[in-house]
Image: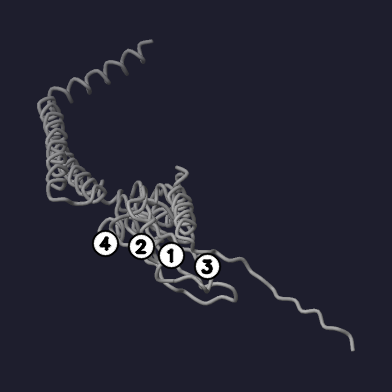
Amino acid sequence: MDQELEQFAAIYEQVTTFLVNYSFQLIGAVIVFLIGVLVARRVSNFVLSLCARKGLDVTLSGFIANTTRLIIIVMTAIIALGKLGISITPFVAAVGALSLGAGLAMQGLLSNYGAGLNIILARPFVVGDTISVQGVGGVVKEVHLAYTVLADEDEVKITIPNKHIVGEIIHNSQNDSIAEFKVGIAYHCDPKKAVQVILESLQGMEGISTARAPQVGIEGFGDSSIDLGVRYWVKTVVRHEAQYLANMAIYEALQEAAIDIPFPQREVRMLKEA
């Protein structure tokens, strides 16, 4: 019992001595750190609003703001440790050693972060663009350091690690996707009239992009029809819906204009036996 009391008294004396000698430094360090966190938050919000006013991409704006906030907090922590008389040199060495080990253990994850940084800075696409990469396509919803999130017309979220994007061939059609197909008309019909009818049927249709005009022309000559190629751009989020409506509108317009859509025919001749 006496030994335990002596240990408690020793601990109490050490704590009391520490508080007497370092209480003001400790309070000062806490105050400095709290002020630094508050300043970091204010500066981060200011940088974010400034980037928004300059029209920067939301992903790049968030990255700059978060990086600024982290730098200020780290600098404040260094100042606070200095207030306590703690040298940060051993911490720097320990962090360096840990970073080396973590880097070797997480090469895949770090490659994703490096690729994400490349995407944010180079901006091959931004939120809202329609991209296709590695056989996967959709509208870009979010761009993070480790991964990018796409969404298709069915609202299915597709998460792609950034290392599978950087260095690959990326198809970026901005906000739209292309719809193209062929429609055949009979050889006795006027192809110029058919082209005009199709173009007029696509004008003002909901879901079809107005940024680029539809393209209609003779694509080839079949055995029983003149093949007209039709290309137009639709909003990616309603791609199939708009395409189905456009197909119906084109069919009805050709019917009203008395332009025939032929079907394959085969002529069979019966030869008489000699």
| 65 relative to 209, above or below | above
- Label 1 – label 4 distance at C-alpha: 34 Å
Counting from the top left corner in percent of width and height, residue 260 is at 53, 64
Q: Categorize mark 4 by other alpha carbons within 10 Å: few (<14), some (14-19), many (20+).
A: few
Query: In the rendered image, which residue does mark 4 sit on?
Result: 122
Identify which amino acid the numbered label 1 is placed on: Val
Between disc 1 and disc 4, whose residue precedes?
Answer: 4
In the image, which is nearer the foreground, mark 4 or mark 2? 2
Badge 2: few (under 14), some or many (20 or more) residues near its Cα, within 10 Å? many
Query: For mark 1, what is the residue?
Result: 230
Q: Of the residues shown, which amino acid type is indicated by label 2?
A: Pro
Query: What is the three-letter code of the residue carrying label 3?
Result: Gly
Q: CA distance from mark 3 to mark 1?
A: 11 Å
Quadrant housing the C terminus: bottom right
Which-is-in-front pick, marks 3 and 1?
3
Front label number (4 vs 3): 3
| Lower sequence index among marks 3 and 1 | 3
Sequence-wise first label, 1 or 2: 2
SS at badge 3: strand
Q: Nearer the viewer, residue 63 or 24?
A: 63
Q: Which residue is mark 3?
A: 184
Q: Residue furthest bottom?
A: 274
Residue at 22% from the left image edge and 22% from the top image edge? 15
- Residue type at tag 4: Ala
